[in-house]
Image (tube, grey):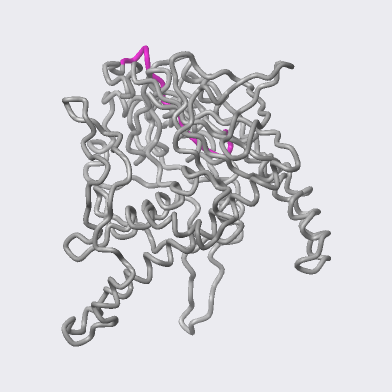
Amino acid sequence: MKLAHRYKLKPTAQQKATLRTWVELCRRQYNYRLGERLRWWEATRTPANACPLKSSIVPVEEIYKDIPEYRVQVRDGRKKGKDGQPVTKKGDTHPNIVGGYVEWQAVQLADLKNTKKKFPEYKQLHSQVLQDVVNRVDYSFSRYTTPDKNGKRSGRPKFKGKVYYKSFTYSQLTNAHLIKDERGRDLVALPGIGLVPLVLHRAIPSGFKVKTATVRCEADSWYITFSLEDRTVPAKEDEAIQPTLSNSIGIDLGLEYFLVTSKGDFVDVPQFLRKAASRLAKLQRNREKHFHGSYPRSRLNKKIAKLHAYIARCRMQFHFEVAYKILDKTSIVFVEDLSLKNLIRRNKPKLDSEGNYLANGQSAKSGINKSFVDAAHGQFVSILKWVAWKLGKRVIEVDPWGTSQYCHSCLNQTPKALSDRWHDCSNCGVSMQRDHNSALLIKKVGLGVASLKKALKGKKPTP
């Protein structure tokens, strides 16, 4: 089982300066190594409508000019065979070019010693931190070149500006790096930086070992995230729990109420962003009075960033509290498998016969989109799944079609507009709040008691 715990650091002024320097050096190294990969990639590509034998962009001898053909291993490998001996040993030679493709991760890792010779400032960086930069480049580039199991690839990797690169990672940290001083303060020993105080607001779970540590600069302070692992705890979801009428509930997500459960529990929408909107707007108006690069503008930018961070943390704390409260009373939760990106998509433009734009209701839709983003239902569902996995329980997503347009009792279709917030069934006489009816219907669909697809008779339900 793997966990991640984040703690707040309290570095001294000198340590803050060192941390900022390390992040900047890592950012520059990331951009340089990414540039190497992109230049080689573009030099070996040929347009689809051109003959590769006649339209070579770069001569072959130039493509492999600065890449050594072999590399020599300088120490025994960590992986051991059945006999207990290292699989790879010191002095072994490995090819850097296999089938015409360069083993870029190995080549760039071996080239780090030349970086330290040319740029002495990189000698202050810990070796693991510098190696992790190359691993990050390899990960982002492999996602661009190699499709995943679904056949999808990410976009072309981008060079990182100062705003988008704010962390570095120690790939080998242990529980021994967490110590207490003579005054009882909690400290973390970061190699190359020293003893840094931290707020250990929760202890490391017994049995878990610290594997890696990522130091990150955020709006208000520095934070460290420990990756923890305990191999004795199973990491798979407990699918042995089968849903029944008594051990499961259905929940319906919305904007009038954040969620409604099939048991009749209503949770109000907190609207953290809406409540802080006036303060945020005031700070942004004051910021626009100052020109770019000025000290007052940068100071206001920090205040705005801190306010956004505060809103995000309040929202996440709310999501965790609701998730634990729900799963404390049940073992299985049924939730709609919503396409959240479609919910906040802009309305399609409307044109008249002359090509002029007509009103399409986007002004009202923008307000709904902002409310959806403020509620962050997608983040809540992810947190709900994680909490369920941690507690050995389950979250099952069901098809959302028709869950707001049918009666949970008799499955009779009761069409409702978005503004209709009450459910009245003309067939069986059930009358209740619309979201409560949807939650009950979601539970029935999840249990397989009700099948809306059969009730639809091949027709798609009204949204």
Up-down: is 41 above or below 52? above
x and y, in percent, of residue 410 in the image: 33, 27
Q: Is residue 429 visible?
A: no
At a point 33% along the width and 69% down the height, the residue shown is 66
Position of 62 with respect to 112 (left or right) is left
Position of 290 with respect to 319 (left or right) is right
Position of 37 with respect to 448 (left or right) is right
At a point 53% along the width and 76% down the height, the residue shown is 357
Q: Is residue 281 visible?
A: yes
At a point 35% along the width and 37% down the height, the residue shown is 413
Quarter of the picture containing the N terminus is: top left
At a point 74% along the width and 51% down the height, the residue shown is 302
In the rendered image, residue 140 lying in the magenta stretch gets the answer no
Up-down: is 48 above or below 301? below
x and y, in percent, of residue 113 in the image: 44, 54
Up-down: is 21 above or below 126? below
Nearest to the observer: residue 234 or residue 406: 234
Span highlighted in magenta in the image: 244-257
x and y, in percent, of residue 53 in the image: 16, 83
Nearest to the observer: residue 443 or residue 276: 276
x and y, in percent, of residue 408 in the image: 38, 27
